Image (spheres, rainbow, N blue to C red):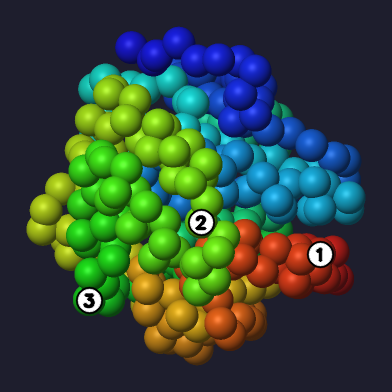
């Protein structure tokens, strides 16, 4: 059962039923729809990942950021078997419930992988695809992802260590941020779900989520790959490999930047996306 939440929290947006689950989302701006999909870190939500991006991108687009099933403030399914097919089914149901026939995607890390699977399976519903530090191809799992990210067990100290591993600029990590993400990660039902998503050996999870080169190469929409050069969670070479496979892909690498491009380089990130999302087909 979903825990009661304080509706005054900025993480709480609107709610709509998708796949039988009350799904939390934010919907801002007008114009062509862009769906933002968050990553898979403990305590994550759409708002946590995209709070700086939503108002900027909404100046030119209709921006929709939702909490993926099992994360944030979307209702939990106690019988869920968390697989890419499960998350895809929830995404399709969410788009249908919102009346969205064709959208662009911006996906962070796991969210980029989910968006890539959607683009490969539903090309007629995908306008453009942008991915940041996404596990779209199989690779040896990094210690940061294995031990701190998906292997997280709640404590303030471990959350602080985890958050300090995300950015190149450690000054971004405040005690208030550590406390907020720790509190979000300790909601009991949600931590149970989180552990179920990423069981050891977690290399198997990376392999299961990744697209094959054939499937990745089938993506025909305009694609933007974004990566922080100092990303400790997903190796930069994954995006280099993907850029050579996706027919209409371009790659932008931010130097002195870790896994949180959308936060660490927020202004440049949004400017890059604005150009990409509003370009001619």
The numbered mark at residue 173 is 2
Given residues 170 and 202, the one toward you in this image is 170
Residue underneath mark 1: 274
Picture coordinates of residue 120, whole percent (x, y)? 49, 61
Quick one: quadrant of the C terminus? bottom right
Quick check: can you spot residue 96?
no
Q: Decide: is 101 above or below 249.
A: above
Closest to the camera, between mark 2 and mark 1, is 2
State the CA–CA distance, disc 1 to disc 3.
Answer: 33 Å
Label located before the other in sequence (2 or 1): 2
Q: Decide: is 200 above or below 246.
A: above
Given residues 28 and 162, the one toward you in this image is 162
| Disc 2, SS | loop
The numbered mark at residue 139 is none
State the CA–CA distance, disc 3 to disc 2.
Answer: 27 Å
Picture coordinates of residue 215, whole percent (x, y)? 41, 69
Residue underneath mark 3: 140
Picture coordinates of residue 169, whole percent (x, y)? 54, 71
Quick check: can you spot residue 29?
yes
């Amino acid at each position: 059962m979903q825990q009661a939440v304080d509706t005054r929290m900025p993480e709480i947006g609107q709610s709509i039923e998708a796949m039988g689950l009350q799904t939390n989302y934010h919907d801002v701006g007008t114009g062509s729809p862009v769906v933002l999909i968050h990553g898979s870190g403990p305590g994550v939500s759409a708002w946590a990942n995209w709070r700086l991006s939503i108002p900027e991108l909404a100046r030119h687009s209709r921006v929709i950021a939702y909490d993926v099933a099992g994360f944030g403030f979307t209702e939990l399914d106690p019988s869920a078997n968390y697989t890419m097919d499960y998350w895809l089914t929830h995404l399709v149901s969410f788009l249908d419930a919102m009346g969205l026939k064709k959208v662009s995607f911006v996906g962070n890390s796991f969210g980029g992988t989910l968006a890539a699977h959607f683009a490969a399976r539903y090309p007629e519903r995908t306008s453009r695809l942008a991915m940041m530090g996404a596990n779209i191809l199989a690779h040896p799992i990094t210690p940061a992802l294995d031990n701190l990210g998906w292997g997280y067990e709640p404590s303030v100290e471990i959350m602080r260590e985890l958050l300090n591993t995300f950015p190149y600029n450690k000054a971004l990590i405040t005690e208030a941020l550590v406390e907020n993400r720790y509190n979000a990660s300790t909601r009991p039902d949600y931590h149970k779900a989180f552990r179920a998503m990423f069981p050891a050996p977690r290399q198997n999870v990376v392999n299961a989520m990744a697209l094959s080169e054939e499937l990745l190469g089938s993506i025909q929409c305009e694609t933007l790959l974004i990566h922080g050069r100092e990303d400790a969670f997903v190796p930069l070479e994954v995006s280099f490999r993907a850029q050579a496979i996706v027919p209409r892909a371009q790659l932008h690498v931010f130097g002195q930047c870790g896994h949180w491009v959308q936060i660490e380089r927020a202004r440049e990130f949004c400017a890059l996306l604005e150009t990409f999302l509003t370009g001619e087909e």
